[in-house]
Image: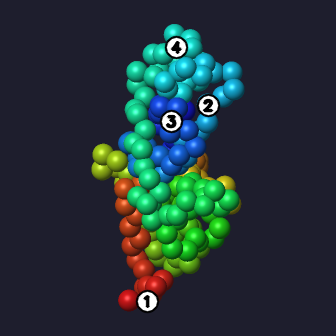
Amino acid sequence: MFLCPNGHRLNAPQRLQGQPGKCPHCNVRFRVPGDSADSDPNSQTLSASSSASSASSLKNSAPVQSAGLSDFGLRDDPETSDVLHSSIGSKQGGSPIVAGHSRLFVEFTHLWKTRAPEASFEIHLPEGEIFVPHHYSPEKSSPELGYFARKGDSGKFQIHLIPWKAVCRLVVNGVADLPFDV
């Protein structure tokens, strides 16, 4: 058993060790980790341990979808091949791409830093929730997690940590000049 980069529990046959894979839950690409040296070589699936709790957690894990490098538009070069850090097109800001969430982090940070005073942001979350931040910290935020704050009715601040993967849509209102060419 192992975790995908977004934390989903997965298992894979030993024959897929070191091969590219794709999480069936979030479609993030990764390399299947190698089995540890102390594991049983006759085991058919990777496992964290042989305890009963580990066995029950394997019931909730999903099999890895085998993926060839051609599925990602990549060539296999053992010297430089790294599915986790490969992307098609140019990388922005040198941050790793994790299922597109890093791109949202980069774009949100750019829009926030160049916003007009009258602009407001709406972060649309699952189940229709809309979060309107008053403050955003690019320094504390990461490609996986946004660090926001807003003032509550009591006049005290509330800090909100929102995973970028939970953001369904971002809306910026009150933009006088577009931050891009049309």
- Return the residue nearer the eye: 67 or 176: 67
Judged from the image, the secondary structure of the residue bearing numbered disc 1 is loop
Structural distance between the alpha carbons of marks 3 and 4: 25 Å
Camera-side mark, 3 or 4: 3
Instruction: Write down the residue under mark 1.
Output: 181
Reading the image, the residue beneath label 4 is 53
Give me the residue at 63% from left, 56% from top: 78
Is residue 84 something one can see in this rendering? Answer: yes
Measure how far apart labels 4 and 1 are at the Cα level: 55 Å
Label annotation for residue 35: 2
Residue 104 or residue 83, whichever sits in front: 83
Query: Which circle, 4 or 1, is nearer the viewer?
Result: 4
In depth, the one of 65 and 133 nearer the eye is 65
Cα separation, mark 4 vs mark 2, equals 19 Å
Helix, strand or loop status at disc 3: helix
Q: Label 1 is placed on what type of residue? A: Asp
Mark 3 or 1: in front is 3
Q: Residue at x 55, y 20 (%)?
A: 42
